[in-house]
Image (spheres, rainbow, N blue to C red):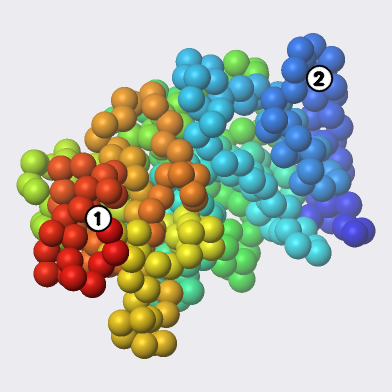
Amino acid sequence: MNRPCAPSPDRSGHYDRTLNNRAGRQNECASNAQDKHPLWETGQETGEGLGLSFSCILYVTNINLTQGDKSRGKRYRVGASIGKGDWTHTPWLVLLDPAVTTTVERNYYVVYLLSRGGERLYLSLAQGCTTLKDSVGIPKAKDELARRAAVMRGRTLPLAKRLSAIEMDLNVDSTVWRGRLYEQGSVLGKQYDTLNLPSEAAMTADLLEALDLYAVLRREGGWAAEDSIVEEAEEDQIPNNGLQQSKTYRQHRTIERDPGHSKEVKKRQGTRCKGCDFEMSDLYGTTARGICDAHHLTPLGTLEDDETVTFDPLKDFAVLCPSCHRAIHRSPDPSDIQGLRTALRKGALAPILEP
């Protein structure tokens, strides 16, 4: 597909110089590399021009995610976009923690955003805006993103040494709603001049701090207020072991509620409950077809901080009806599907359940 040579014709000279500058640094790094990190290939596949630019960002910053943490390389999903058909006003490259979100449309993540024209590159702890915008409209989405950013900034800024609260300027006009919402939703970040990038070591350190703060937000509940976190656990009748246990429960439910995980689990496992063996449509008719939950089998409270949560749709999840799902979360071991099945077969349903 043919694309325009630059997203902003009036800045095409600057943009071309940016790419040429990056290309030289990319070739220099490539010639010194023993093995190309898989993320290099992600950058190469994003398309002409910006694909080169993003692959340079990936490699020049030496995004070797295993630095200091052997699990980093497996923890994040990496994606990039320069637009479909024509250039997007806000090209991006994102690192997603599947324990938080599987899409850039919702929740929060670490992202590189290139301003229109290519003068500025931002590293940002940012928020997805599309789902929120579709739900409440652009004006209310701006207010809500700002509110959420303030909460998350309060949880991360005291820990930040390299990132700070920034006024992001993506150089887009008021009609480009996505760019404006990206600006509004930035939690913390770092701005770079694309023609004068800092050293590889400095950019790597910036990224690793962003990922550390991302992990803090995941553990602390994102933008949710602490009383809301506790109330959620109480409403689901989870045994009350304090705020930290409630935060762990919220992490677990965030995984299970993510549409990306749920859709894939149902596709691979079907929708028949692994506890009671019922298909909800058998009980309630066609209106209940497909009603089931994707239960994640790993109790997050049992993991060390440096352990990676896995999300294999066949091995790491079990399809449960809403009742069985609620029951297993109240059990001593939420991973014990056989224990749930045994308990069910000792109760009132015993005569109609298979062993």
Q: Is residue 138 visible?
A: no
Quadrant assignment for the N terminus: bottom right
Above or below 266: residue 187: above
How would you rate the neighbour count of disc 2 (Cα within 10 Å): few for under 14, some for 14-19, many for 20 or more?
some
**Residue name at image x 27 percent, y 48 percent:** 338
Q: Quadrant of residue 304?
A: top left
Which residue is more in the foreground, 268 or 45?
268
Q: Is residue 333 visible?
A: yes
Q: Point out residue 281 in the picture as x, y percentages from the top left corner.
A: 38, 81
Task: Give the residue type that dot 2 points to.
Answer: Ala
Q: Which residue is mark 1?
A: 341
Which residue is more in the foreground, 349 or 113?
349
Q: Point out residue 117 in the picture as x, y percentages from the top left corner.
A: 74, 49
Q: Point out residue 291 in the picture as x, y percentages from the top left corner.
A: 37, 73
Q: Secondary structure at mark 2?
A: helix
Q: Which residue is mark 2?
A: 30
Above or below 140: residue 67: above
Q: Point out residue 151 in the picture as x, y percentages from the top left corner.
A: 28, 48
Res. 305 mark: none
Which residue is more in the foreground, 162 or 288?
288
**Residue name at image x 48 percent, y 15 percent:** 68
Task: Give the residue type that dot 1 points to.
Answer: Arg
Q: Quadrant of residue 341?
A: bottom left
**Residue name at image x 24 percent, y 35 percent:** 301
In the picture, measured across the screen, residue 102 lies left or right of residue 3, that is: left
Reading the chain from its start, which is encountered first: label 1 or label 2? 2
Q: Secondary structure at mark 1?
A: helix
